[in-house]
Image: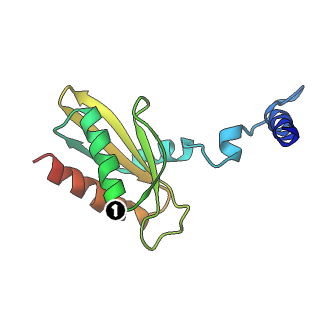
Amino acid sequence: MKNLLVLSLTLFVLTTPGCASSKYNLPALAGMNISDLESAKDKGLAKTFNMPLNTAFDETLNILKAEQLTVFRSSKKKGYIIAMGFKEQVDTTRVGIFFETISADKTKITISCLSLTALPKAEKIVFGGLSKASL
């Protein structure tokens, strides 16, 4: 119980800016911030699939699981999956997969990554798997 109290107090102190504002926030400190991947979307790879967003999202999760990749974070509501564990990449290389509804039966998927070598690997796995699923 004492450890939990100390941990809670420590987190509170670290995340409360006090009188001065801080440029750091808890997600950034924990490595869970995805704004860098969102910013890289314009340099990413995009493709539209003939399936609703819910189906595309669920199929993508199944593809990642079948490839034994780690889903680091995901939110169907916000339309993203962050995956890691691509072969021949550093274990912490994150790939962002972003979903955008085009119409009731069309979804645009954009893959972004700060690593130029991981991006084509992710494209082959995700887009290749979704192309098979949409047939």
Exactly how many numbered labels are in the figure? 1
Q: Position of residue 61 (x, y in %)?
A: 34, 47
Indicate the colouring scheme. Answer: rainbow
Q: Which residue is mark 1?
A: 67
Q: Quadrant of the N terminus?
A: top right
Q: Position of residue 3 (x, y in %)?
A: 85, 43
Farthest residue, direction bottom? 88
As rendered, which of 53 and 116 lies closer to the eye? 53
Farthest residue, direction front? 1
Q: Position of residue 30 (x, y in %)?
A: 68, 47
As rendered, which of 12 and 39 lies closer to the eye? 12
Farthest residue, direction left? 135
Q: Residue at x 38, y 62 (%)?
A: 68
Does 108 sit left or right of 73 as displayed? Answer: left
Q: Position of residue 74 (x, y in %)?
A: 46, 41
Q: Secondary structure at mark 1?
A: loop
Kindly indicate the quadrant of the structure image that contains residue 9: top right
Does 107 sit left or right of 77 as displayed? Answer: left
Q: Residue at x 74, y 40 (%)?
A: 24
Kindly indicate the quadrant of the structure image that contains residue 18: top right
Q: Amino acid at mark 1?
A: Glu
Q: Residue at x 21, y 26 (%)?
A: 103
Does 2 sit left or right of 57 as displayed? Answer: right
Q: Residue at x 32, y 33 (%)?
A: 100
Q: Residues within 10 Å of mark 1 (few under 14, many from 20)?
A: few
